[in-house]
Amino acid sequence: MEPASAARAAFREHFGAEPALLVRAPGRVNLIGEHTDYNGLPVLPFAIGRATLLAVGPADAPRLEAVSEGFPVPASLPLDADPATVAEPWHRYLAAALAVLGDRLAGRGARVAIASDLPPASGLSSSSALVVGLLLGLDGLFGLGLGPPALADLAARAERIAGAETGGMDQQVIALARAGHLLRIDFLPPSTRHLPVPPGWAFVVASSGQPAPKGGAARAAYNERVVATRVAAALIADMLGAELEGTPVLGNVADIDAAPILVDELPARVSPRKAAASLGVPVERFVGLAADTFDPDVLLPVRAYARHVLAEAERVDLACAAVEAADLRTLGELMLASHASLRDDYRCSTPALDALVAAMTKAGAAGARLTGAGFGGFAIAACERGREPAVIEAALAAAGGPAFAVEPSDGAALL
Ligand code: NG1
Ligand code: MG
């Protein structure tokens, strides 16, 4: 059953009523600009045709009742549920969405039935689609007056509460995407720009055959990179004699011509505690919400990480220019350079992702790269329209799938 019908049917079956409304929240894929968002540097994602569908209706009690096709255990959460004490990971996202709404719900409860054709733990942002979709559903049900920018902002805060020090790319593109367009997102200062995809271009996404789980070691590895790049930003700012205010991010120094040179001056490895001591700032400034998964005495390869982030931000600028010039070949080269940098400097690829990228490129893609946080999950390839079947076939042979073509699609909306 396609997910809209499945969500509606599940609502009827579990709650014995018709849903009041239906929300579609698409997954997303990032074309280029990986691990830049939490550094305040640009990204270039688009929303895809696969989506999470939520059938939503009011409840009599002040609780959120939810069932999801993909997960056996239904949720029944008080409106003030503490996300930290919720055991099921997907319930935690629901609790976090309730938490960011604060008292906007004014004691009103809701029922939700969820169905999705997004593969979970893929790097296609099923978690963000769930959070954006739920917030949009509650907004539609109770008239909370959240526009897409507020929605994206609340959803990003919810995912941080749920445990990932996320930058906000996924939530913004899911809320703001437009069919046929890529979305360039800037963070410092915040702005977005829709870029039409040149005719004749096509995109394929493919699984590496290994999940990209959000919990445990993968979450710790993600948060480690967030912390390490904050340390790098603070050390570079210090070399420049700049004042440190708030959470340091590489976006604050990226526009300074000397930054790439100063990256080479960074220590190859340093611990956050040692860096904090040398700068005379509290180590909490780097660790933030990641504290529970993070050992501040571990040595981090800050130089290589910073080198990736600053080069990747430049590649986003060049990729936008390539899209505007309909120059698929240059875009492909930038994607391959991004993958190499993620593999060698950011150390978040896997042998399976490397093999998948190589196979899709050999099959005629202009370029390919891991997409999302890495450590498993999916890769994206860009190719000429008509070459998708060959690229998909190569991906299936290399990693077993799933592999499918994706079209830039509209963002989350009430149906
Ligand atoms: P994935 O792994 O696709 O959920 C994560 C972050 C993004 C971004 C990318 C790396 C979350 C919800 N998303 O994406 O914000 O930082 O990694 O570019 O944590
Ligand atoms: Mg995600």
Image (spheres, helix red, strand yellow):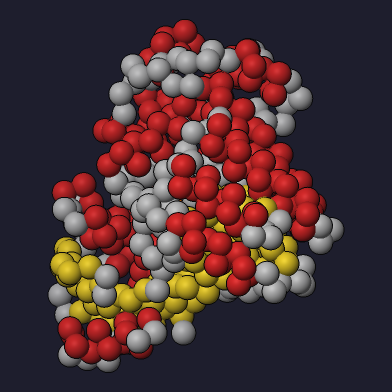
Residue 314, position as x, y percentages in the image: 71, 39
> Which quarter of the image is occupied by the N terminus?
bottom left
Q: How many marks?
A: 0
- Asked if 285 appears above or below 64 in the picture, the reply is above
The reply, left or right, for residue 166 in relation to residue 70 is right
Which of the two residues, 111 or 119, is positioned nearer the viewer here? 119
Residue extending farthest right: 325
Which of the two residues, 282 or 116, is positioned nearer the viewer here? 116
The structure residue drawn at horizontal position 44% and vertical position 72%, both measured from the top left corner, is: 51
The structure residue drawn at horizontal position 29% and vertical position 46%, both measured from the top left corner, is: 215
Answer whether residue 132 is visible to the viewer in this image.
no
The reply, left or right, for residue 189 in relation to residue 148 is right
Q: Kindly indicate the quadrant of the structure image that contains residue 98.
A: bottom left
- Asked if 156 appears above or below 391 in the picture, the reply is above
- Asked if 385 appears above or below 309 in the picture, the reply is below
Residue extending farthest top: 278
The structure residue drawn at horizontal position 15% and vertical position 67%, both measured from the top left corner, is: 73
Residue 219, position as x, y percentages in the image: 34, 41
Q: Kindly indicate the quadrant of the structure image that contains residue 409.
A: bottom right
Answer whether residue 364 is visible to the viewer in this image.
yes
Residue 88, position as x, y percentages in the image: 19, 57
